Amino acid sequence: MSQSLQQTKIAKRYVNALFASVTTKTEIATMSKDIADVMSMVNASTNFQTFIKSPLLSVNQHKAGIEKLAKKAKLSKPVTNLLMILAENRRLNVLPAISHEVENYLAKESGTVPVRVATARALSAADQKKLGADLKAAIGNDISMQTFVDESLIGGIVLQVESTLIDGSIKTKLDRLERQLTSKAA
């Protein structure tokens, strides 16, 4: 759940524009593969992570880096154009949110509901399977579940089902209790 709501809103606009520009399933598959490949490169390289997040690099430096990446990775023209626009608008830091929104877009197109799950500790395979089955039964559709570890939650779980956020974390409960106690003391 590392992306902010603002980044998610921005990412949705870019993804909707990206997919509005294509007509065939082959183009959609190519673009989604290219974005997944770029995100794999980002996740594998701390230098690349620094590159997309750095406000110290100029627009021209970002664009030059994207050009080299696009040529070396043989990215499709729409994805290259998207990355260049992100560089031009100084929005490369939104790339992880864009990757997530691409997954959501593809899931919706296939009738699958995207679900993000954040927990304080990693879930075992059995727990993930049971949670997935329970969520599928509750939602009534197939789901695409992504799990994340967020140690700041202390315990509990945070679910994001499409645009609905369900926060059952201990951190949130403690924050709520603190606000109640401080408002009564004042």
Image (tube, rainbow, N blue to C red):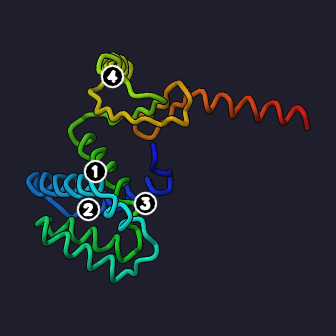
- The alpha-carbon separation of the residues under discs 1 and 4 comes to 23 Å
Question: In terms of secondary structure, where does tag 3 sit?
Answer: helix
* Residue located beneath label 4 in the image: 128
| Mark whose residue sits in front, 1 or 4 | 4
Dot in front, 1 or 2 = 1
**Residue 145 in picture, x, y percent from top left:** 32, 32
Q: In the rendered structure, which disc, 1 or 4, sits on the residue that comes first in sequence?
A: 1
Q: Give the residue at mark 2.
A: 18
Of 21 and 80, the residue lying toward us:
80
- Numbered circle sitting on residue 102: 1
Task: Say whether disc 1 or disc 3 marks the residue closer to the N-terminus.
Answer: 3
Residue 158's place in the image compared with 58, above or below, is above
Q: Are marks 1 and 2 in contact (CB under 8 Å)?
A: yes
Q: Is residue 51 left or right of residue 26?
A: right
Q: Are marks 1 and 3 in contact (CB under 8 Å)?
A: no
Residue at image position (29%, 29%) is 143
Q: Are marks 1 and 4 in contact (CB under 8 Å)?
A: no
The residue lying furthest to the left in this view is: 26
Against 43, residue 149 (above or below) is above
Judged from the image, the secondary structure of the residue bearing numbered disc 2 is: helix
> What residue did someone put label 3 on?
10
User: What's the CA distance linking mark 1 and mark 2?
Assistant: 9 Å
Q: Nearer the viewer, residue 144 or 13?
A: 144
Closer mark to the observer between disc 2 and disc 4 = 4
- Cα separation, mark 4 vs mark 3, equals 30 Å
Residue type highlighted by circle 4: Gln
